[in-house]
Amino acid sequence: MRVRPVAPDDLEACQTIVRGLPDFFTDDVPDKIATDLDAHHGWVITKDDGVVGFAVVEYRSSRAAEILWIAVRRDQRNQGAGATLLEHVLDALAADDIALIEAKTLDASADYEPYIATRTFWEHHGFVHIDTIDPLPGWQPGNPAAIQVCALTSTR
């Protein structure tokens, strides 16, 4: 597996990954991915058969960023691609002097089974649930957002 910055010709593969995960993403997300990849930092993880995952990060300030999107192709899940990609992204952000990372995911109060593994993934990588917001602007009401943060360095 190899992680590299996203290239313009990776967009279709990223959108295909999202479309292949309908339990996790709504129909409007492929268009949002296009907009966000154009405006923010992105990485892909590749194998011999091409792009198997991607991540998009928005810098919020000189010391904070948000992981807007991270996804791995369905047939590559639970094989380490997501962990490898996330660790690469976190290392890149730390090297850029980012201290805090935010990620949003569906809160446990939604009682939606597919996201149990997603929340476990974030927790395993050092993210801490700090708040739940419903409705979160930009999210449909009834889809409570779990706000999670990870400290890459001390802020004191």
Image: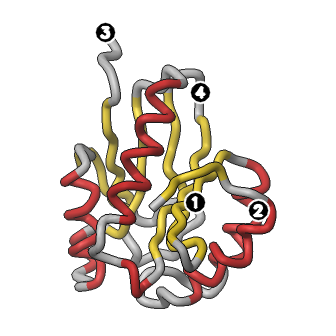
- Please, is residue 145 above or below residue 65 in the view? below
1 or 2: tag closer to the N-terminus: 2
Q: In the image, residue 153 lies at what x, y percent?
A: 33, 21
4 or 3: tag closer to the N-terminus: 4
Q: Amino acid at mark 4?
A: Ser
Tag nearer the camera, 3 or 1? 1
Q: Amino acid at mark 2?
A: Thr
Identify the residue position indicated by label 4 in the image. Answer: 61
Q: Tell me which residue sits at (38%, 63%) in the image.
A: 82
Q: In the image, residue 122 lies at what x, y percent?
A: 28, 56
Distance between the alpha carbons at the discs numbered 3 and 1:
33 Å
Query: Would you call the spot at circle 4 few (<14 residues within 10 Å), some (14-19), or many (20 or more)?
Result: few
Q: How many marks?
A: 4
Distance between the alpha carbons at the discs numbered 3 and 2:
35 Å
Q: In the image, residue 128 lies at what x, y percent?
A: 23, 45
Secondary structure under tag 4 reads loop
| Circles 1, 4 touching at the beta carbon (< 8 Å) | no
Quarter holding residue 109: bottom left
Query: Would you call the spot at circle 2 few (<14 residues within 10 Å), some (14-19), or many (20 or more)?
Result: few
| Circles 1, 2 touching at the beta carbon (< 8 Å) | no
